[in-house]
Image: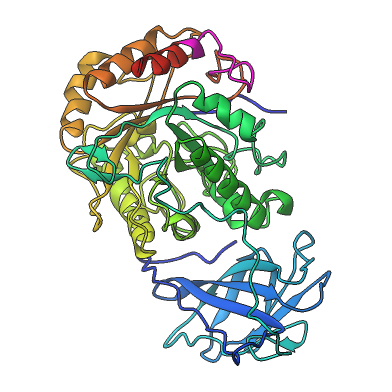
């Protein structure tokens, strides 16, 4: 859905082949505490480059700034990074803190990531220094092993007995016991646009009371739109709204949604890439509007990072790209669907495309088995050839995503019967966005009935206090007060289980 008005990493060529992290172990004598520890991981690799990360823990006296150095032994070259200022002189790589993450108390940790080129071999660095002190080696003995403080933003343990771990079985989403689960709820917009516009991370409150208000509508799912540049902490994003801060905010919201018994759905809404052709939402190269397709430059890295973060939590659902519309740029429907699945160079789009197969591969290469949703063409309103161009998924965990508003082309039962029903007969079908710009609910009432009759899933757009005729918005207050449009969804969800 387009929004109402409000007042670079290395280009990867060829297919991305992401690999499991390679981590440098910490070697100490029993009972000894290193002055600092560094965990180095290779989180993605392709023909000429790779993505890496470091996690630094300070076990000594607090510091107000930090500088990490290490050497590459195989000619690797850092090209760009995030959550630190990265530089390289010869073989020596240096990462210094940003202004917002320089303070490291005793036992505190900080993470940063980078993209680098390589050829021949990609040997892992063996020695690290933090502010000149060698890390990962014995320091003063201590009577007990150090205990890292718990990170309050880590994803909750799976299998908490409240939110089901979901997987695809035939054309249904089911829980661990094989019971069918429908995803019914709302979208919580904000994380896709506030950060890139420089206003914050969320649009309105996402505290416990605000999430409880969603659950009070009898919702069991919250879709959370995201921005790839904000997650990766790229240079055009204010540091306080990007990188580690943005990731932490997303992890907090996921935990809060789960705490209220609802399934979190993470979705890439806005992405990088300059497009000025038919139906362009903006001329900006940055992730400041809906683009026709995801980009190869950043999107695989975004999903590799998101998937790595939540791969141990099977309650989280991934929606890979909000509303593709390559059909507005290409000459034929066949070209559009090929672009959708295979990416690469697509007619009418000036940046290199990451196809849906690329993104599925990026997620699965991390070891994440989470359910994946894929929207079709025409802003996810067209699923007519979704089954024909369905990507390959080694986990067998793909579902179709569909969006519908009263002003879309496929907005009547005849179209739903002819194009949606065949898809729903083979894979789970989730209407990730339903809505209307009439400030009423007669249209979404029809949609919900069609989906109810077939035991399918749907989520209303959107849980934000906007003008319901341009948003459209479900609420007029974050306490859950509905608009005249939102009343339809609220009352319907509350009536489903009596």
Q: Nearer the viewer, residue 268 or 399?
A: 399
Quarter of the image for the C terminus: give it: top left
Residue 229 sits above or below residue 381 on the image: below
Residue numbers of the magenta segment: 474-487
Residue 365, how many percent across, how many down?
35, 64
Say if the magenta span includes residue 477.
yes
Q: Residue at x 62, y 79 (%)?
A: 38
Write down the quadrant of residue 199 in the picture. top right
Q: Is residue 286 visible?
A: no
Residue 439 sits above or below residue 394 on the image: above
Decide if residue 157 is on the left or right side of residue 375.
Answer: right
Chief secondary structure of the magenta span? Answer: loop
Residue 317 sits above or below residue 401 on the image: below
Residue 103, how many percent across, how many down?
79, 66
Q: Residue at x 22, y 42 (%)?
A: 178
Q: Nearer the viewer, residue 99 or 146?
A: 146
């Amino acid at each position: 859905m387009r929004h109402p008005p409000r007042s670079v990493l290395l280009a990867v060529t060829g297919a991305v082949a992401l690999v499991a992290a390679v981590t440098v172990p910490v070697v100490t004598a029993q009972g000894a505490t290193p002055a600092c520890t560094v965990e180095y991981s290779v989180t993605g690799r392709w023909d000429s480059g790779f993505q890496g990360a470091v996690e630094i823990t300070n076990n000594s006296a607090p510091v107000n700034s930090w500088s990490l150095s290490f050497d590459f032994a195989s000619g690797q070259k850092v090209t760009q990074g995030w959550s630190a200022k990265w530089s390289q002189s010869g073989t020596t790589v240096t990462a210094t803190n940003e202004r917002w993450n320089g303070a490291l108390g005793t036992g505190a940790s900080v993470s940063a990531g980078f993209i680098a080129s390589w050829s021949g071999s990609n040997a892992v660095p063996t020695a690290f220094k933090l502010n000149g002190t060698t890390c990962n080696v014995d320091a003063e003995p201590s009577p007990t092993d150090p205990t890292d403080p718990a990170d309050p933003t880590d994803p909750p343990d799976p299998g908490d007995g409240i939110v089901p771990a979901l997987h695809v079985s035939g054309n249904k989403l089911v829980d661990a016991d094989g019971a069918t689960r429908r995803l019914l709820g709302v979208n919580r917009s904000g994380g896709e646009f506030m950060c890139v516009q420089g206003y914050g991370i969320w649009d309105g409150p996402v505290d416990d009371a605000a999430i409880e208000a969603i659950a009070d509508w009898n919702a069991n799912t919250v879709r959370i739109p995201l921005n790839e540049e904000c997650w990766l902490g790229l240079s055009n994003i204010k540091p306080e709204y990007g990188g580690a801060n943005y990731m932490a905010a997303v992890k907090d919201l996921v935990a809060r949604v789960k705490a209220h018994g609802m399934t979190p759905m993470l979705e890439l809404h806005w992405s990088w890439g300059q497009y000025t052709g038919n139906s362009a939402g903006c001329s900006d190269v940055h992730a400041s509007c809906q683009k026709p397709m995801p980009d190869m430059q950043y999107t695989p890295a975004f999903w590799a990072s998101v998937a790595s973060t939540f791969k141990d939590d099977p309650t989280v659902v991934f929606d890979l790209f909000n509303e593709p519309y390559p059909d507005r740029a290409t000459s034929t429907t066949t070209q559009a669907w090929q672009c959708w699945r295979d990416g690469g160079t697509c007619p009418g789009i000036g940046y290199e495309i990451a196809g849906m197969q690329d993104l599925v591969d990026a997620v699965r290469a991390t070891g994440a088995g989470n359910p994946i949703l894929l929207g079709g063409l025409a802003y996810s309103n067209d699923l007519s050839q979704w089954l024909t161009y369905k990507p390959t998924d080694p986990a067998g965990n793909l579902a179709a995503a569909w969006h519908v508003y009263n002003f879309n082309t496929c907005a009547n039962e005849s179209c739903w019967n002819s194009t949606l029903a065949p898809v729903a007969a083979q894979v789970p079908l989730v209407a990730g966005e339903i809505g209307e710009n009439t400030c009423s609910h007669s249209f979404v009432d029809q949609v919900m009935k069609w989906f109810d009759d077939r035991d399918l899933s749907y989520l209303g757009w959107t849980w934000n206090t906007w003008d319901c005729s341009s948003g459209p918005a479900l609420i007029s207050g974050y306490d859950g007060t509905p608009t005249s449009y939102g009343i339809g969804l609220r009352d319907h969800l509350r009536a489903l289980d009596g």
